[in-house]
Image: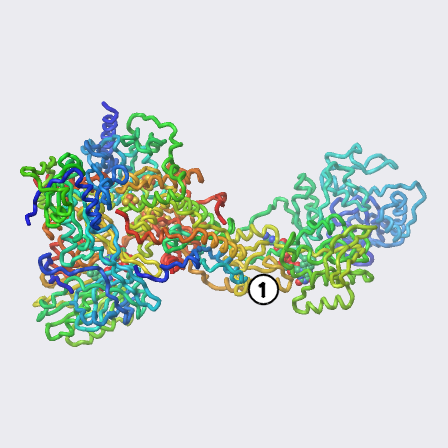
Amino acid sequence: MIQTKHDQDDTAQWQPRIVAFLCNWCSYAGADLAGMSRLSYPASIKIIRLPCSGKVDPMFVLKSFERGADMVLVSGCHPGDCHYTSGNYHARRKLKAFRELMSFLGVDPRRFKFSWVSAAEGAKWSKLVEEITAEARELGPFRTFPEAAKTEASQ
Amino acid sequence: MPTNKLYEGVSDWLQSAVETLSAAGMTVIAPTQGEPGVVNLTRVTSAEAIAERYDNTLLPLKGQFFPITETLLEFERCEDGDVEIQTEPLPAPDEVIVLGCRPCDAAAMGTMDKVFQWDYDDVRYRARRDRATLVAFACTTPSPECFCTSVGGSPHGDEGSDVLVFGLGGDDSGGRVLLKVNTDKGRQFIDRLGDRVRPASEGVQPPSPPELARRFDTDAVKAWLDEGFDSDFWQQMALSCLGCGACSFLCPTCHCFDIVDEATWNRGQRRRNWDCCSFSLFTLHASGHNPRPEQFSRCRQRIMHKFKYFPERFGRIACVGCGRCIRACAAGRSLAEVLTEVDARQKG
Amino acid sequence: MSPEASTAQSLAQTAAEMLSQGQVALVIGYAPTEGKRLSPPVFVTTPEEAQRLGFDSRCFGNLSVYLWSPQVRQMGKTAVVVKGCDVRAVNVLLRENVIKREDIVLIGVRCGGVGDLPAHKCTVCDCRDPQGCDVVVGDAVDQPDGAAEGRYSAAEALEEKSLDERREFWQRQLDKCIRCYACRQVCPLCYCKRCIVEKSTPQWVETSAHPRGNLSWNVVRAFHLAGRCVGCGECERVCPMNIPLGAINQKMAKLMEDEYDFRSGMSPEEKAPFTTFSTDDTDEGIL
Amino acid sequence: MSRAMPNVPATTDDHALIPMDYTSSKMRIASIVDETSDVKTFRLTFCDEQEGEAFDYRAGQFGLYSVFGAGEATFCIASSPTRKGYMECSVKRAGKVTGELHQCNVGDIVGFRGPYGNWFPIDLMKGKNLVFVGGGIGLAPLRSLIWNCLDLRDQFGEIAIVYGARSVSDLVYKEELETWRQMEDVSTVLTVDPGGETPEWEGEVGFVPTVLEEANPSADNAIVITCGPPIMIKFVMMSLEKLGFGHEGIYTTLENRMKCGIGKCGRCNVGNLYVCKDGPVFSYSQLQELPQEF
Amino acid sequence: MINLTIDNQQIEAEEGKTLLAAATLAGIDIPTLCYHPAVPSAGACRICVVEITGGGQPGLVPACAYPVQEGLEIQTESERVVASRRMTLALMLARSPGATIIQEMAQEYGAEPVPMDKGDDDCIMCGLCVRVCQDVIGQSAVCFEGRGHERKITTPYDKQSEVCLGCGACAFICPTGAIDPADYCPHPLETIPNDFNCGLDTRTPIHIPFPQAVPNKPLIDRENCIHFITGGCEACKQICPADAIDFDMTDEYVTEKVGAIVVATGYELFNPDVYAEYGYGRYPDVVTSIEFERMVSASGPTTGELVRPSTGKPPKTVVFLQCIGSRREQGGLPYCSKICCMYTAKHAILYKHKVHDGQAFVFYMDVRSGGKNYEQFVRRVIKEQMATYLRGRVAKIFPSDGKLIVRGADTLSGTQVEIAAEMVVLAPAMVPAAGIRNLAQTLRIGYDEHGFLLEAHPKLRPVETNTAGVFLAGACHSPKDIPDSVAQASAAASKVLGLISHQTLTREPTIGIVDEETCNACFECEGACAYGAIGPKELKDRKGEVTAVVAYINEGLCQGCGACAVTCRSKSIEVQGYRDDQLFAAINATGR
Ligand SMILES: Cc1cc2nc3c(=O)[nH]c(=O)nc-3n(C[C@H](O)[C@H](O)[C@H](O)COP(=O)(O)OP(=O)(O)OC[C@H]3O[C@@H](n4cnc5c(N)ncnc54)[C@H](O)[C@@H]3O)c2cc1C
Ligand SMILES: Cc1cc2nc3c(=O)[nH]c(=O)nc-3n(C[C@H](O)[C@H](O)[C@H](O)COP(=O)(O)OP(=O)(O)OC[C@H]3O[C@@H](n4cnc5c(N)ncnc54)[C@H](O)[C@@H]3O)c2cc1C
Ligand code: SF4
Ligand code: SF4
Ligand code: SF4
Ligand code: SF4
Ligand code: SF4
Ligand code: SF4
């Protein structure tokens, strides 16, 4: 093992790593508004912008966990508000099933969040991030995925 | 020192062997029962864990030396643009005793040795191989899919094992046994067991192997293969093949592998993974050209490789008749049947 | 004549007729063979060979998987022997444009269940009488009672466990996966020209058989089959590592039935839940 | 170091085993030349100077290059062993590794292991007339050999180069092509497929085999080395037959997919040969005996 | 054409026209009571008599019934004529002393009531109603009944009539206003409040929505039109000289393909009746600013005369309350409506113009007069004492003695004030137009929690929205006054011109692209696309034979949402700009 700073998580200062997939038109704009309005929210969140929540492939969520995310958030426009009319409905259906599948396989569903945040909801955004960050902190580091690769298949 | 010597083991020899060897810091690998009906080689510290009755392990022995996935090196891209590479350290030299593989699997290691130790010597494979002693348990009841006798082996075959153990009480593992030493390593193993084994009494002979009819003749098969590359036989025989890797992955002599990098942002591992010539992507070129574009050509490759190319190159057949591919095949295909048919074609 | 023998006879007869009249170029069926655990598929191109066709309780295979094989397609119009449950897979293939109805002939066979102890899918089967086939052979069979209740029993048993227990269970199971992809290859609905695991730019699913790659692979497979899987059980049957893939498929199928009142493959027309949506879908769990 | 002799299958008894742990040497990208829209030539130098000095290879050999994180890919060494201190490879963007490589910048570190495989029979070529026939990116392995021969010009007879690409913009090594054209003792014919020419194009227009026939090189005492897309090779062979060349004197290199480069991973296996060990250079007569799986 | 002379004026008239029509056309006024262009003349009232002085048999004739003749010479105000009218009016005055129009005319002609039994019926028996009902409406619900003295206008059998449509044509046409349709009809037509005037007056079913409407044409309000209710009437059709009435015309949805849309749906006012303390809706003299605006408007219900709704007399004291609903976190809206300070100042001035001796008070929170010359404007109002500005909120309004007591705080002096007002004007908050959310969802543009539409970027793209080709103008975007609305509208217009003045459209390259080699042609993606951008495409070999069918994405239709890419299992669709390898790299980077 090459030792690096990443290996030593200082638990006291441990910051959860949250990967957020935001749709461009609502949630990303909402997060942007939060920024512009100088509303502070934890820096633990790493935002990836997508055109639409309907573009969030379950693969993205899996990959984020593999890359060490402690929590993944997908956020899109409120029902009916999708810039692309129905992308968020598609997302809602698929991601619900995905969460159920993950939960069935023993992955804590609390680690996978889904929210509606509109472009005007800068305040909701910052509150949401604060809340889920607190929850992620409570859940603690999510090691299942990243560490799995280090173990070679048992046989 | 003479090898090929017979020893008798008293009824608790196995228990004692596991204890003694473990106590000496060795790793004992033995067949254990996991889920119902599934036996695999795992590390044991007590003989109780060892499976009593089984045809063969689900996964072949090869994985102990050539794991399904293994790290070759680790790397990290540093901030300054440099890359730090660390070759994965070789497996620790402490000894490994495989206590209870089948003779076919032991024989298969001959094939693996050839590949991994010609021209370039795979150090990782060699390190694992060198430290291991193979104690094979002779088969008493071959399964219906077994065909070792057709490919030059036997339920009591010596090849590849350091020690071959015959049950005298009929039971596979425990009980009174006869141990046949095949190599120096085998002798060292016997020596370690102390008083739980003793030279066999005069006249004690290993039991005769169970009946297992030879189904085809590898020479005839080879002769047909020499000419048969373009035969339409291949297309017919391959129709039902789904092109999965089940047969190859479970085969104790299949050794194809892939090398991949798996990395997060700036660090990762280079890994070696089992691969399989039945996969359509196996030979696909970047240009889109595929030297073996149809499933039948891949099926043909698998058989040709085992029964023609490999023998030509390395002087031995790359199949030990363990029957795993037949048991595993999703489509119920049988290599033995295919070869029987080839044999029949050659003989007219 | 035993029921099996008479079914075999009608199959052979039907196939021989179709072949001799040039209706089809190929008949894919089962060839029950003494001493085998599985009645393997057989590809019959002449009326004479049709004699090999038969049907018994070892005919696990879902032969519809061969319908889209390039080699089979090359051979021309194909008849395939299908059990009632296999028809569901055919329906999905039709729905997804993989095959055209006019290119195939369906020979349905009434099936009383396969396996020594009938396989789980057979105890909960509600389609023993094949629907929508061109010909149906075999004697009438009884439909088991209470099929609907036990339909998702394997998934339900796991659902009842705690999250940790499930994690522990699946970690152990999925760690075994050797990435042979037999589950994929045998699945009639995994017909992708290039499976996602084979896409290297980018490599979404790691190909190494370590627990991480295995989990991703099995999640992706399950997700791709969600709303499509017809529960034929082939993937679980062929998995050389005995991973209970059926439970995962059941979980998704149950979700589809509970949430969207949808069971895959019941007709060639209906659309899979993941290609559409409803504005009434639940907002539960959404922040 | 490479051990296999050209076209002689190596066996276990040949020589002592070379330990192999699949590790890569680090090399630094010294320069990058854009050859075409999807081909770049990388000049690499060993990060460890000693390693660089000890490094030796023959024209025709290949190596496994890696971008850490993306993986390894096989490319022939495109520079001549007579030019010391660096090594070059020309890479066509095709997938994961090649794609990542194209993203690299000068100064970046890549991995390399090799050289592997056999080489062009340069000893057999001495005193002979040489005909190089290349197509597209297939000029990369030939380039190594061409410069090798040009750097030892007096050891060879006449040298002819026939090279073509789909269009003017697909020609690689444009400057070197011009240099060869200017050379008095090399006859260079360049061509592009019909439709691929530009108004300024001064070379031929036509497919390589046709142009080759027109160039009509003498088969006497000649050796042909050809490399290019499979379809081109097929027709070039027919043309060469017409021109009276025997199969023995024609060499080409194969590109079967390979992962280990050292005869283990099984991928490049064709018949009883491993392209990585017994090739990638093969004589045409050898190829004719192999199953046509390359 | 017929030539004749009226009041010494040479006139040309169409043959068949009456003298009345010819005179009217020539601008000569002939008074009449029983004439209406919509119904046949009856010459019943004899007010329209004129004198033939030449060209025909001399004498008095009813102008409404006498046809024009070549060479006739007519006098409309000759002595004989005036005398005749005076006589007629005298008789009428005796019968219907209460009818205003008779009183007025009698005064004009100096008619005194003849001494006879004084009637109390406004009906002058002109019979217009009977004729309109019979000839225009086609119903005959009213008729003459009785003889001589007993003669009267009534419904058959004097009963409310089922035949009567309740259209009110009789009442409308009656010159003296003697008819109440409710007497005739069990279900008379209701009066229709005039929306434009905030319901302060009424309008007819056929009406021009408001002055300056574009196009300035009447429209029929089907819900209230008697024709659409009963199938009869058609009075408008009968009288329309242009024959422009077409009852078969239906509302239609006009589908236009457009390159750009400017949303300018404006605002509505917050309904202040939620604040019970102000009594809006309960006390007629509490009005909103927009009602006030109409009241003082020359085109308004009172033609510009400011009167108290309760008394119809000009209010002597008016109290203006600002910030009704605005700037109110609890039970209101948190934002400032921006326009009320200024228009209230304007209202104070207008009030002073209408009621010179009136007194105006303004309760305000603080005066926001940002804008060119705005502060000066407000200063002027205060300085010139057009209104007394009181900083504070009003706690309660209650009626007392015909007035409204406004009780509030003056926070500047720190005193409680009580004003006995005759009118209170509330300035409610500006809210977006109803249905804005629907509209926004249809156009796929964003809106905030109040429904104001969202611009693409508050600083850099203030008139654009997130949907390409949709722009914003005016109060739909945020509270704005007219100059701001016009400025934004002009900006939007120039953005539109910038967009559509090019031959080709440049759009973001974010579109889906199918990998034709790996597409399975399952067309699952087709179902996922909300834009119908996906269809089949045939791949052909060099010979032109179809080798495969794959999915194809129309780049003009595709919006690049990526729903298809997620639906595609084999990952055969990439969205440009959000390609898988880019996202993969982004996800990888999160693990940094
Ligand atoms: C001896 C030899 C010499 C070569 N020399 C050159 C050279 O000088 N310049 C050059 O541009 N290319 C050369 N190639 C081809 C080069 O190896 C492949 O283009 C490269 O490996 C593709 O790697 P990738 O990771 O970018 O592609 P991947 O993402 O791995 O795959 C993309 C596609 O390429 C196919 N592919 C993957 N690996 C290989 C492989 N090793 N060989 C062929 N196809 C493959 C895959 O099946 C897939 O279809 C050579 C190949 C060989 C065997
Ligand atoms: C009492 C009062 C006095 C004012 N006095 C002044 C003043 O003196 N000076 C000044 O600058 N400003 C004044 N204002 C403000 C002024 O009225 C606004 O600034 C201005 O009207 C805004 O213009 P607009 O075009 O954005 O919206 P609007 O004037 O509201 O126009 C919007 C139009 O869109 C229509 N519409 C709504 N929804 C739809 C739909 N879905 N489809 C089609 N059409 C739709 C509406 O019917 C309306 O015709 C006053 C406001 C009030 C309330
Ligand atoms: S296991 Fe069977 S189906 Fe799979 S590749 Fe092997 S022979 Fe083919
Ligand atoms: S069949 Fe089983 S072992 Fe093979 S890839 Fe599928 S789950 Fe893994
Ligand atoms: S996923 Fe398994 S059970 Fe479902 S259709 Fe495919 S093979 Fe059958
Ligand atoms: S797992 Fe998914 S991508 Fe792979 S073949 Fe099956 S459906 Fe296609
Ligand atoms: S990206 Fe969205 S709009 Fe474009 S084709 Fe796909 S689903 Fe339709
Ligand atoms: S979903 Fe994918 S495979 Fe299916 S038609 Fe669309 S692009 Fe092709």
Q: Nearer the viewer, residue B178 or A58?
A: B178
As drawn, the residue found furthest toward the front would be B195
Would you say residue B346 is visible in this rendering? yes
Q: Residue at x 22, y 53 (%)?
A: B257
Would you say residue C133 is visible in this rendering? no
Q: Which residue is mark 1?
A: E490
Q: Is residue E149 left or right of residue D235?
A: right
Q: Nearer the viewer, residue E543 or E317?
A: E317
The percent position of residue C126, horizontal first and vertical second, equals 36, 31
The percent position of residue C168, horizontal first and vertical second, equals 35, 44
Q: Is residue B227 left or right of residue D258?
A: left
Q: Is residue B193 left or right of residue B286?
A: left
Q: Quadrant of the N terminus of chain C?
A: top left
The percent position of residue E310, horizontal first and vertical second, equals 79, 50
Q: Nearer the viewer, residue E164 or C119?
A: C119
Q: Is ligand 2 within 8 Å of the beta carbon of the residue shown at mark 1? A: no
**Ligand 5 picture quarter:** top left
Q: Amino acid at mark 1?
A: Ser
The percent position of residue A66, horizontal first and vertical second, equals 36, 53
